[in-house]
Image (cartoon, rainbow, N blue to C red):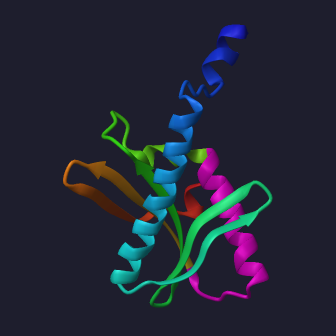
Amino acid sequence: MALLRFHTQRTDNRTPEERREALEFGKIGEQMAAKYLTDKGYLILEHNYRRGHLEIDLIALDEDELVIVEVKSRAYDNILQPEDAVDHKKRQALIRLANEYVKTHNRRENVRFDIVTVVSKADGAEIKHLKNAYNVMSF
């Protein structure tokens, strides 16, 4: 049983400085994602929409769709793709919070869930936009 618990616990071996740098890069990644979407014609309605411990990075309008955007930033190429960090549990939390947002803000648009990834490269950053990355029906 202890072995199972060991494997399911998230470990973070980074130093406090490395964690601060990762947090700062995440903020920069969210800013880059917002600019990218704005340049594509999206209207950003919310940055870091929070309720309790849940957060939606960006909420935007794309024509007649309300878009819930999870931004994943990486300072380096990794074996795992950044979007792979948006697991089932994270998706469920985003769907719950999106439902709350729609109700409390009287939104009538169809809702879409996107992921934007920002990966630092030697010559800048690579931004990838995964439209309709998942949907409520897949749960």
Q: Is residue 90 above or below residue 9?
A: below
Drawn side of residue 13 relative to residue 79, left or right: right
Residue 92 shown in magenta: yes
Q: Which residues are magenta?
A: 89-110
- How far across and how far down the image is residue 38, in percent? 40, 82
Q: Is residue 26 above or below residue 37?
A: above
Count of all numbered marks drawn on residues in the image:
0
- How far across and how far down the image is residue 129, in percent? 35, 64
Q: Is residue 73 above or below residue 133?
A: above
Quarter of the image containing the N terminus? top right
Drawn side of residue 131 relative to residue 45, left or right: left
Residue drawn at x 37%, y 87% as measured from the top left: 41
Drawn side of residue 56 relative to residue 97, left or right: left
- How far across and how far down the image is residue 119, in percent? 33, 51
Residue 78 shown in magenta: no
Q: 15 and 97: which one is in front?
A: 15
- How far across and how far down the image is residue 125, in percent? 28, 57
Q: Quadrant of residue 131?
A: bottom left
Residue drawn at x 65%, y 89% as measured from the top left: 108
Q: For the stretch drawn in magenta, what is the main secondary structure?
A: helix
